């Protein structure tokens, strides 16, 4: 009788431990770093970085040097309001900016903004003459309508 041969055992690879994996990763990373150091630097990349740095530096310097803007003299010139406008803001001469502020105070105090569309302003008795008879006006038209009533 012939002897049966035992089946060959396959060689089993041992798994690396986690510490061995970490050290091999570190070695690969250090090799990449040294390769990067030895390679010639790209000129375009360094220029872009230096431009960014200079731009950021200029912005910081500009922020420090920036002074408060001076208002335009035309806006700050006191103008006398018409009788229709005087009913809302008063009869004393005021600059355009203050006139618009006072009108908005009046609108908010009397809740004249349309609740559905807040861009629209509903006219009451005083504003009806100011708006040229229109019952509702857009807030974007407000300055144009007010400028007609300033002298």
Image (tube, helix red, strand yellow):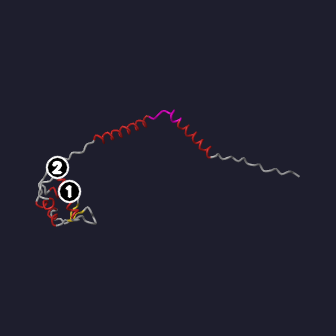
Name the quarter where the C terminus is drawn. bottom left
At horizontal 15% and vertical 63% (from top left) the residue drawn is 132
Element at badge 2?
helix
Q: Quadrant of residue 130?
A: bottom left
Which x, y percent locates residue 114? 25, 65
Residue at the spot 80% in from the left edge and 50% down from the top edge: 6
Residue at the (19%, 58%) spot, across then down: 102
Q: Position of residue 110 (x, y in %)?
A: 21, 65
Measuring from the top left, give residue 119's x and y in whole percent.
26, 61
In the rendered structure, the answer to whether residue 103 lies left or right of residue 47 reads: left
Magenta run includes residue 127: no
The reply to whether the C-beta atoms of the residues labelled 2 and 1 are less than 8 Å apart is no
Q: Which residue is mark 1?
A: 101
Report the front residue among 145 and 44.
Answer: 145
User: Is 40 one of the magenta-colored residues?
Assistant: yes
What is the quadrant of residue 117 in the picture? Answer: bottom left
In three-dimensional space, the C-alpha distance between marks 2 and 1, rounded to whole angstroms, equals 13 Å
Q: Which residues are magenta?
A: 34-42
Dot 2 or dot 1, earlier in sequence: 2
Front residue of this view, candidates 108 and 84 = 108
Q: Which mark is residue 111?
A: none
Find disc 2 in the rendering and name its residue. 76
Residue at the spot x=27%, y=63% of the render? 118
């Amino acid at each position: 009788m012939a002897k049966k041969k035992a089946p060959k055992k396959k060689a089993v690879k041992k798994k690396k431990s986690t510490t061995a994996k970490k050290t091999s990763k570190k070695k690969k990373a250090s090799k990449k770093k040294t390769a990067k150091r030895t390679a010639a630097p790209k000129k375009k990349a360094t220029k872009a970085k230096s431009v960014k740095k200079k731009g950021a530096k200029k912005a910081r310097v500009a922020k420090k040097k920036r002074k408060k803007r001076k208002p335009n003299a035309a806006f700050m010139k006191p103008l006398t309001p018409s009788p229709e406008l005087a009913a809302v803001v008063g009869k004393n001469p005021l600059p355009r900016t203050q006139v618009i502020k006072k009108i908005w105070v009046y609108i908010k105090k009397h809740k004249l903004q349309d609740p559905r569309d807040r861009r629209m302003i509903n006219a009451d008795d005083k504003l009806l003459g100011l708006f040229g008879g229109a019952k509702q006006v857009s807030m974007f038209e407000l300055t144009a309508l007010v400028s007609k009533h300033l002298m």
